[in-house]
């Protein structure tokens, strides 16, 4: 009963917020007839506290995507990311920080350059909250972040940003807000920059520093989040959302670059407050850079509870920061490939992101499904399919379309689909534009998918990270 009442209030809050946003935008935009044809804006967020409890700034989805491909390329593209990996990472970081650090990454106010967000991250149990636009990500395992980290309830919450070149592709795919492009491989353009800030859900700085010493002197945000990630597997995780402090731990970057052997460059930074730099954001120190999966290397090694960083110098497509006074002990990915502190130590940036496709036939790693793992044991040729050098813009499965390594892009269309599915019936754009025979097929398809989706929704796959037994090889 208590749950039902809470749910009812949550419903009002969520509905109330989206109503407010739409009303405001409609008032602002109702002056010209052309605007009448504009699609309604995507909702800013899915979860927020009541306005009587909070009057500060709220998250605003930057969604005014450019209609034409922007001409200016980021200047860091001229740096050789293999030779001058460190300068490269620093310059990409500067590009992402410029005009953003002083406005707390409320990017719609950036006066240096335009940044955008991905739509449809508001929907579902992991959906966006309204303080900073954070979504629920992965749980963090005991000792994953430091030898002193005994807490196993924390997890990561995060927000992604897209530069104008990347925003152009999002806008093209989502031009019609009710019929996203889904029948062709998506490809970001040269110079697209994607970055993400990740926070962990420790509630105060004493606990954070005891658990993970490098989080001292931290950057803290408010979030309306499920801070205890064990609750994410409960039937309705939304009821566990509350206002809580979260602390910055990691920054990810992805750059679409035609000079990269397979089209993408990945980079990562980890927060180290002991550096005590005047600009705290600069305490995000480089972890490394990656542009190739090293498919020839099938040695099964991982460092899931890192006491020190173990660098695999045999890798050809990953470079890790060798300075252990700067970089806190970190686990990296499978056999030393690049991965961040909250990422899976048996995977890699490249490995996970290569599987972003529509429909999402592949899982991010065989570890997330016991049958897939049984058929593709660690290090086997099947397992190595997740460590092949898939080219940008190519789908992982032949029956799917590529979402060009962007997991939020893949999620945006999956969330949209799931929303239609939960609602049931035939969506109006389909009804108006398609003949009855098609509608019959669509209904049958929706019914079949509903059954299917019970077994393997995306959030179940994500939740499965906790339940799939993983055998880590300690070094
Ligand atoms: C276990 C799988 C996994 C691993 C490993 C992983 N990611 Fe992601 N990443 C995701 C998922 C899922 C999302 C989308 C969810 C979100 O951002 O809210 C995402 C989102 C992102 C985004 C936002 C842009 C987008 O649309 O995808 C960036 C940038 C990113 N990751 C970079 C990295 C980098 C760099 C690494 C390695 C240091 C990495 N990721 C490792 C699964 C992974």
Image: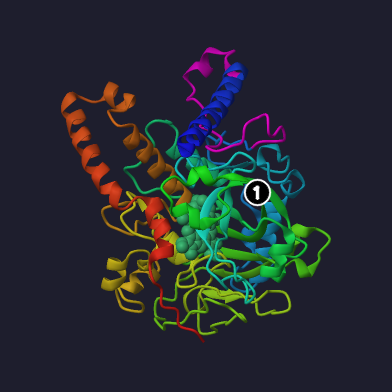
Residue drawn at (34%, 36%) of the image: 422
For residue 341: magenta?
no
In the image, residue 350 above or below residue 245:
below
Mark 1 C-beta closer than 8 Å to ligand 1: no
Relative horizontal placement of residue 320, taking residue 441 as reference (left or right) = right
Give percent across and percent down for residue 292. 47, 71
Q: Nearer the viewer, residue 241 or 319?
A: 241
Decide whether the magenta segment is chiefly helix, strand or loop. Answer: loop
Q: Residues within 10 Å of mark 1 (few under 14, many from 20)?
A: some
The residue wearing badge 1 is 244
Q: How is the image coloured?
A: rainbow
What secondary structure is marked by label 1?
A: strand
In the image, residue 253 above or below residue 214:
above
Relative horizontal placement of residue 144, taking residue 440 as reference (left or right) = right
Q: Please report the bounds of the magenta region as a residue range.
A: 29-58
Residue drawn at (72%, 74%) of the image: 326
Give percent across and percent down for residue 167. 54, 42
Q: Quadrant of residue 391?
A: bottom left
Q: Quadrant of residue 471?
A: bottom left
């Amino acid at each position: 009963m208590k749950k039902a009442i809470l749910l009812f209030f949550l419903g009002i809050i969520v509905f109330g917020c989206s109503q407010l946003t739409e009303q405001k935008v409609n008032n602002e935009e109702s002056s010209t007839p052309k605007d009448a044809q504009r699609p309604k804006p995507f909702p800013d967020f899915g979860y927020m506290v009541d306005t009587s409890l909070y009057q500060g700034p709220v998250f605003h989805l930057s969604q005014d995507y450019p209609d034409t491909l922007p001409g200016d390329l980021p200047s860091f593209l001229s740096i050789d990311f293999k030779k001058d990996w460190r300068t490269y990472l620093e310059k990409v970081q500067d590009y992402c920080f410029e005009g953003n650090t002083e406005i707390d990454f409320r990017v719609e106010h950036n006066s240096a350059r335009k940044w955008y967000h991905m739509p449809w991250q508001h929907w579902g149990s992991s959906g966006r909250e309204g303080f900073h636009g954070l979504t629920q990500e992965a749980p963090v395992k005991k000792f994953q972040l430091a030898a002193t980290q005994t807490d196993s309830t924390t997890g990561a919450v995060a927000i992604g940003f897209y530069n104008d070149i990347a925003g152009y592709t999002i806008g093209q795919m989502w031009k019609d807000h009710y019929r996203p492009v889904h029948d062709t491989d998506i490809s970001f353009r040269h110079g697209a920059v994607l970055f993400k800030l990740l926070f962990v859900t420790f509630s105060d700085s004493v606990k954070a520093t005891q658990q993970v010493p490098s989080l001292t002197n931290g950057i803290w945000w408010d979030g309306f989040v499920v801070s205890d990630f064990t609750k994410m597997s409960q039937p309705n995780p939304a009821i566990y959302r509350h206002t809580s402090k979260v602390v910055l731990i990691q920054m990810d970057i992805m750059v679409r670059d035609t000079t990269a052997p397979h089209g993408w460059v990945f980079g990562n930074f980890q927060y180290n407050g002991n550096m005590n730099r005047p600009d705290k954001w600069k305490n995000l120190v480089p972890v490394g850079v990656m542009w190739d999966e090293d498919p020839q290397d099938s040695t099964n090694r991982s460092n899931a509870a890192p006491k020190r960083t173990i660098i695999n110098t045999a890798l050809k497509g990953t470079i890790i920061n060798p300075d252990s006074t700067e970089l806190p002990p970190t686990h990296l990915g499978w056999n030393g490939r690049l991965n961040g502190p909250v990422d899976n130590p048996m995977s890699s940036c490249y490995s996970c992101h290569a599987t972003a496709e529509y429909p999402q036939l592949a899982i991010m790693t065989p570890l997330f499904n016991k049958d897939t793992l049984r058929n593709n044991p660690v290090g086997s040729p099947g397992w190595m399919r997740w460590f092949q050098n898939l080219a940008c813009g190519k789908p992982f499965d032949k029956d799917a379309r590529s979402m060009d390594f962007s997991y939020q892009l893949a999620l945006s269309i999956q969330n949209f689909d799931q929303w239609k599915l939960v609602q049931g019936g035939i969506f109006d754009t389909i009804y108006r534009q398609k003949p009855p025979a098609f509608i019959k097929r669509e209904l049958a398809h929706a019914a079949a998918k509903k059954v299917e989706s019970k077994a393997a929704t995306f959030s179940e796959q994500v939740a499965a990270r906790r339940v799939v037994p993983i055998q880590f090889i300690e070094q």
